[in-house]
Structure formats: C-alpha cells, structure tokens
C-alpha cells in the first residue's frame, strides 16, 4: 500500500496493472460509469487500481462538465468548435493514462482537481 512520489519520478503503487489500465480505458466506452465500476470492484489492498480509477473518475467529471458547457455554447456557435476539441483531448489523455497505468504508474490528469 505504498505510494512513492518525487518531483522527477512518476508515482507508482502496487497492484494489478491490467485493471488499472482498464479503469482509464473504460472511460472511452462508459464515461463516468467505467471508472466507478473499477473503483467499486478494486480490492481493498490494490492501491494502484484505486488511485487510477479515482483519477480517471475526476477527469471524466471535468470532461462531462466541459461537454455540457460546450453543448450550451452551441447556441452561439462557439460550442461547435469546443466539442471536437474536448473530444480529442479526452481521447488522447485517456490513451496516455491507459499506457502509464499499464506500466504501474498512478497517472494524474493535468489541470484536474481531486473531486472524489
């Protein structure tokens, strides 16, 4: 249950790397529900899966809010530019997080507050 961290090295934790990676990848199919499922299914002592699922859930909540705001802004046409931009950002960051989690790292999305 140790989480190591320093400024130069990525945070790592002990746990199932496959489930940690799937916690991120599941967000591509089931935005918020995927990470919630892996957070609930994670073993009590599997810190890697728990931390990655929490980080994924936090990011998906932020992305949900961004998509809702973009949807509202389609009335003034700004949202038409923001929706595809946010979709690309979501896809790229989730893929990066999936690879990092599969390597045993606890990936923290940039500019994402800790909501959960």
Image (cartoon, rainbow, N blue to C red):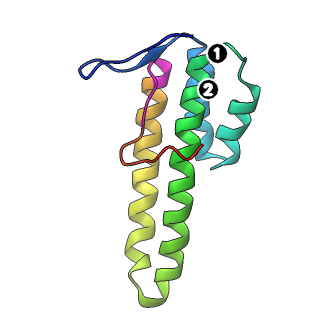
Q: Looking at the image, which is closer to me, 24 or 53?
A: 53
Image coordinates of residue 25 in percent, x first then y, are: 57, 36
In the rendered image of this protein, does residue 100 appear above or below residue 34? above
Asked whether residue 79 is drawn in magenta, I would say no
Asked whether residue 107 is drawn in magenta, I would say yes
Residue assigned mark 2: 50
Q: Main SS type for the magenta part? A: loop
Residue farthest toward the left in the current orientation of the protein = 8
Residue 56 placement: quadrant: top right
Q: Looking at the image, which is closer to me, 115 or 89?
A: 115
49 relative position to 94: left or right: right
**Which stretch did the figure color magenta?**
101-108
Image coordinates of residue 85 in percent, x first then y, are: 38, 62
In the rendered image of this protein, does residue 115 appear above or below residue 12? below
Give the residue displayed 49% in from the left and 20% down from the top. Answer: 102
* Separation of residues labelled 2 and 1 (CA atoms): 6 Å
Say which quadrant the C terminus sits in.
top right
In the rendered image of this protein, does residue 1 appear above or below residue 109? above
Total count of labels: 2
Say which quadrant the N terminus sits in.
top right
Give the residue displayed 42% in from the left and 35% down from the top. Answer: 108
Residue assigned mark 1: 46
Give the residue displayed 43% in from the left and 47% down from the top. Answer: 112
Give the residue displayed 54% in from the left and 45% down from the top. Answer: 58
Q: Are marks 2 and 1 in contact (CB under 8 Å)?
A: yes
Query: In the structure shown, which secondary structural element does the residue marked by tag 2 occupy?
Result: helix
Image coordinates of residue 74 in percent, x first then y, are: 48, 83
Q: Looking at the image, which is closer to me, 40 or 101?
A: 40
Residue farthest toward the bottom in the current orientation of the protein = 76
């Amino acid at each position: 249950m140790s989480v190591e961290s320093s400024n130069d090295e990525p945070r790592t934790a002990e746990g199932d790397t496959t489930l940690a990676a799937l916690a991120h990848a599941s967000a591509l199919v089931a935005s918020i529900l995927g990470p919630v499922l892996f957070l609930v299914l994670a073993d009590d002592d599997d810190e890697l899966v728990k931390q990655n699922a929490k980080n994924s859930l936090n990011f998906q909540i932020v992305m949900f809010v961004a998509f809702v705001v973009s949807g509202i802004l389609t009335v003034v046409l700004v949202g038409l530019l923001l929706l595809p931009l946010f979709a690309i950002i979501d896809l790229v960051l989730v893929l990066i997080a999936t690879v990092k989690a599969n390597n045993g790292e606890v990936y923290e999305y940039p500019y994402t507050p800790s909501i959960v």
